[in-house]
Image (spheres, rainbow, N blue to C red):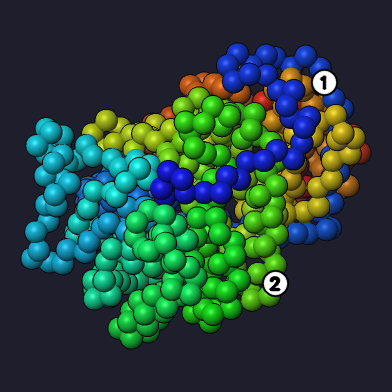
Amino acid sequence: MAAMNRRIFLGTSALASGAAMCGRMGFAQAASSVSLRLKLDPHKRGNPIPEDFTGLSYESAQLGDPDFFSPDNAELVGFIRRLGRLGVLRIGGNTSEYCDWAPEGASTVDAATRDDRQANVLPQALAVGPDTGHGPAKPRQITPQAVRNLRGFIDATGWKLIYGLNMGTGNVEMAVAEADFVTRTMGDKLVAFQLCNEPDLFYRNGLRKSDYGFAQFAKEWQQYFGAIRQKLPQAPFAGPDTAFNTEWLVPFAQQFKSEAAFLSQHYYAEGPPTDPSMTIERLLRPNPALIREFEGMAQTKRDTGLPFRLTETNSCYQGGKRGVSDTLASALWGADLMYQLATAGGVGINFHGGGYGWYTPIAGTVASGFTARPIYHGMLLFAEAGPGHLIDATIENQRDAPLVTAYGVVNDGGGAGESIKAVIFNKHADRAAHVSVEIGEKAEQARALRLAAARLDDTQDVTLGANPVGASGAWEAAHEETLSLQNGTAAIEVPAGSAALVSFNLGR
């Protein structure tokens, strides 16, 4: 996250019809139903969904507590493993610009930790939420022990790591020393270093002067990159990790395409949370700015060959908005965003979180335990659909249901045979969708899992397959519907404010 006035707001609505949705509280049951036809063509394949597409993002300051990202934190390990056997953890955020490397022998109790202890807060209970950007973050020290524990945590989850370094208030020598230790400790688990967080906002949050632009950033980036590569010739890098400035992507790609493993940028759908117009209705509408960002991403990929990862994203910046970011609506929005990104050619996504931020997928502390927030259930829906290849998915008769979206995925189920998945989102609050799903193939069976709650603004009773996520990420479907099949077509009712995952087993 970045400063309070950090973004050119991205939330203009593209569809006036979405305005008919009810107010935030007390969403009514659907008063009407529309009939739709979803045609999937497994022979028209789109972009792949890699196994490590899913990711989470945490503040670098969380490493100030070495016990948080540790293999001993089995509960958090369980939650992360449940989202996929492969994935990418990103350490960065605003606080990465205020974290100092403390090598062996240096003081390991930083000023912020001393303040916490004086307030009778046990270190092992500390969890760092998303930085709100209202001012400079508390300085934190990152120790070798924290990095060693992080490696154990990464091994326990099976995931890999994107690691943020401090170019904001740090210096080259410190960055080289930290990168050296992280590289030696992480080995092939390290996907990339990122040298900074949202440098396009450095001038707004006081880290650089008002005339700071891409030219100055590129010069600094090259200085840090060159020094680290001199010490570590094979060190991987990514960037520019901008907040919203797509104008930096092309020049960065052009200047550093031979040095970067991938391009990275951030996206927040809404903000600031103090604005009363930041609502569920607004969150669920299509966002023209996101469409433009993805179009620019795809063009840059075509021009330079560099893949793209959304390394920090969520619903409403500054940690989210209560009653919006912690609801079923956020689960529908988040899962749909994952498919939008994959359709545009992105290779991965990292949902930002930590502590008790309203939008965090996993909330809690080591001492108090962890729970899955609604958006986690949306990510779990994506995990259940699985990696594979996107296929052509066309919704017919959609004029009366513009907030219904659908995606098709073909994957190899191993011993279970090849399968086709249809993922359908109904983001309307006032109408159900009766969907006929045609796959153009002979299927042996069609089954459905539902992502649902009583209301779009429900914060507590979100379920997938009629079951919530339990302790340590424990989950299995309590109810899986068998759908009738006729000539490769299955019919399913998708109620207002819900999603459905329809799986066709081809038996081959």
Q: Residue at x 48, y 33 (%)?
A: 273
Residue 506: x, y in percent? 78, 47
Secondary structure at numbered mark 2: helix
Residue at coordinates 69% horizontally, 55% vertically from top-left?
292
How far is disc 1 from disc 2 in space, using C-alphas? 41 Å
Measuring 90% from the left and 35% from the top, which residue is drawn there?
A: 397
Q: Are marks 1 and 2 in contact (CB under 8 Å)?
A: no
State whether residue 204 is above or below residue 130: below
Residue 156's spot in the image, x, y percent? 35, 53
Examine the rendered structure and indicate whether residue 32 appears above or below residue 334: above
Relative to residue 390, is residue 460 drawn left or right?
left
Horizontal side of 189 relative to 508 (left or right) equals left
Residue at numbered disc 2: 302
Quarter of the view holding residue 38: top right
Q: Is residue 82 above or below residue 273?
A: below
* Mark closer to the chain start, 1 or 2: 1
Q: Quadrant of residue 217?
A: bottom left
* Residue 48 on image: x %, y %: 67, 60
- Reading the image, the residue beneath label 1 is 33
Identify which amino acid the numbered label 1 is placed on. Answer: Ser
Disc 2 marks a residue whose amino acid type is Arg
